[in-house]
Image: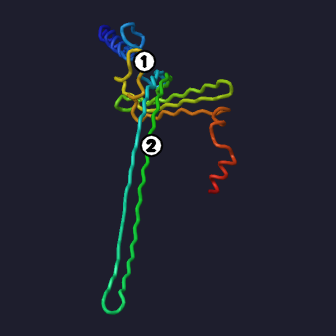
Amino acid sequence: MRLTYIMIVALITGTTLSQDFRQNLNKSIFSDQKANRIGDAVTILVVEQLTASNDASTSSSRASDLSLSASGDLSSIGASVGTGNQFKGSGATASHGVVRTKLSARVDSVLENGNLVIQGNRKIVINGEEQSMKISGVVRPSDIQADNSVYSYNISDASIMFEGSGIVSRAQGPGWVTKFLHWLF
């Protein structure tokens, strides 16, 4: 009876004090400390290069001619009518942009498949000029590198925003008179 009692106590104690290996995963000197839970931080390496171009050309023409002529003993009768229409147009657009920066984000939630929903922002103010960066998206844990960083092109459903406001930004935009005239016309 006493042996049964000791075995039951050992069994209960063993199951209540057992540890989940994932709890100590980040404390091991043999494993990388990667983001894997809500609230964990991850470094985003924003490396984006965008290039786009578009060329268009249109050419059309139309011509029509109508004539009438008669001859005989009476006087010669002649008439002629002609019309023409011609149009040529062309246009081109090109855009190029490069962005490189580092930004920290935190894990907002963990999806059922283990992917991490991340969100981060940074605001920098220099001499009254404010620059803000925001990033959000979904990261696969396998895309997180050993140094706990992930490239922006590995973020699905990524939203990357860079915005600025201040004296320089206001000077680059049109004035209120120009805005008003554009609104009228």
Residue matched to label 2: 93
Amino acid residing under circle 2: Thr
Judged left or right of residue 101, residue 144 is left
Vertical comparison of 12 with 135: above or below: above
Amino acid residing under circle 1: Asn
Q: Residue at x 44, y 43 (%)?
A: 93
Among the two numbered marks 2 and 1 on one chain, the one whose residue lies closer to the N terminus: 2
Q: Residues within 10 Å of mark 2 (few under 14, many from 20)?
A: few
Q: Quadrant of the N terminus?
A: top left
Residue matched to label 1: 148
Q: How is the image coloured?
A: rainbow
Residue 65 on image: x %, y %: 35, 73
Query: Which quadrant of the figure has residue 67?
Result: bottom left
Residue 4 on image: x %, y %: 30, 11
Residue 32 on image: x %, y %: 38, 13
Residue 141 on image: x %, y %: 37, 24
Q: Please state which of residues 160 and 55 is positioned toward the viewer in this rendering.
A: 55
Q: Please state which of residues 6 and 177 is positioned toward the viewer in this rendering.
A: 177
Q: Residue at x 36, y 8 (%)?
A: 30
Q: How many marks?
A: 2
Q: Please state which of residues 14 and 134 is positioned toward the viewer in this rendering.
A: 134
Q: Residue at x 41, y 35 (%)?
A: 51
How many angstroms separate mark 2 from mark 1 (CA)?
39 Å
Q: Secondary structure at mark 2?
A: strand
Please tell me whether mark 2 or mark 1 is closer to you in this view. 2
Query: Which quadrant of the figure has residue 31?
Result: top left
Q: Quadrant of the C terminus?
A: bottom right
Q: Secondary structure at mark 1?
A: loop
